[in-house]
Image (spheres, rainbow, N blue to C red):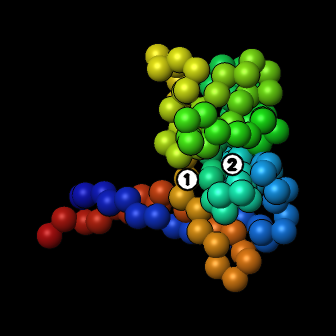
Amino acid sequence: MSTTTTTSWFLACKTSDVPTNGGVCVKYKEEQIALFYFARRNEWYATQNLCPHRQQMALSRGMTGTVKDEPKVACPFHKKTFSLKDGRCLSDEHECSLTTYPVKIVDDLVYIGVDAVMEMAGV
């Protein structure tokens, strides 16, 4: 048996549900995802909502901005900053990173991509 991973898209919200240059928390099954909209760049990002240090669901409430043209979010508790593009910690390269998710907009609706693992029987 082999496994393949594909991206499955779920409807997260309407574009108008997300504050300009801010974030919201979206629930998908048992998972919380932080969704961010950078209006000045017209870019959307999604990461895990769980802070890897405090183990609290808080990143959607973090401060967003850029450092050297890299979109970032700062945890509201300890101000560690994470790249919204790839999830790496920008404050300390040896720190934990975040899971990131692809985002697409279709007709003012926001979709987030999650991995769907499919098992296939061998021939």
Residue 67: x %, y % from top left: 60, 34
Asked which secondary structure carries label 1, the reply is strand
Local crowd size for mark 1, using a 10 Å CA cut-off: few (<14), some (14–19), many (≥20): many
Please report whichever mark, 1 or 2, sits nearer to the chain's N-terminal start.
Answer: 2
Residue 85: x %, y % from top left: 53, 46
Rendered residue at 78%/36% (across/down)? 63
Position of residue 120 in the picture relative to residue 84 (left or right): left
CA–CA distance between discs 1 and 2?
9 Å
Rendered residue at 64%/68% (across/down)? 111
Q: Nearer the viewer, residue 2 or 80?
A: 80
Local crowd size for mark 2, using a 10 Å CA cut-off: few (<14), some (14–19), many (≥20): many
Position of residue 61 in the picture relative to residue 67 (left or right): right
Quarter location, residue 48:
top right
Q: Does the image show residue 120?
A: yes
Q: Which residue is mark 2?
A: 33
Asked which secondary structure carries label 2, the reply is strand
Residue 89: x %, y % from top left: 54, 27
Q: Does the image show residue 27?
A: no
Quarter location, residue 91:
top right
Q: Nearer the viewer, residue 82 or 50?
A: 82
> Do the residues under discs 1 and 2 have CB atoms within 8 angstroms?
yes
Q: Nearer the viewer, residue 123 or 55?
A: 55
Quarter location, residue 38:
bottom right
Image quarter hosting the N terminus: bottom left
Amino acid type at circle 2 is: Ile
Rendered residue at 46%/64% (across/down)? 7
The correct choice, above or below, for 22 with respect to 93 in the image is: below
Amino acid type at circle 1 is: Tyr
Q: Residue furthest left?
A: 123
Q: Which residue is mark 1?
A: 101
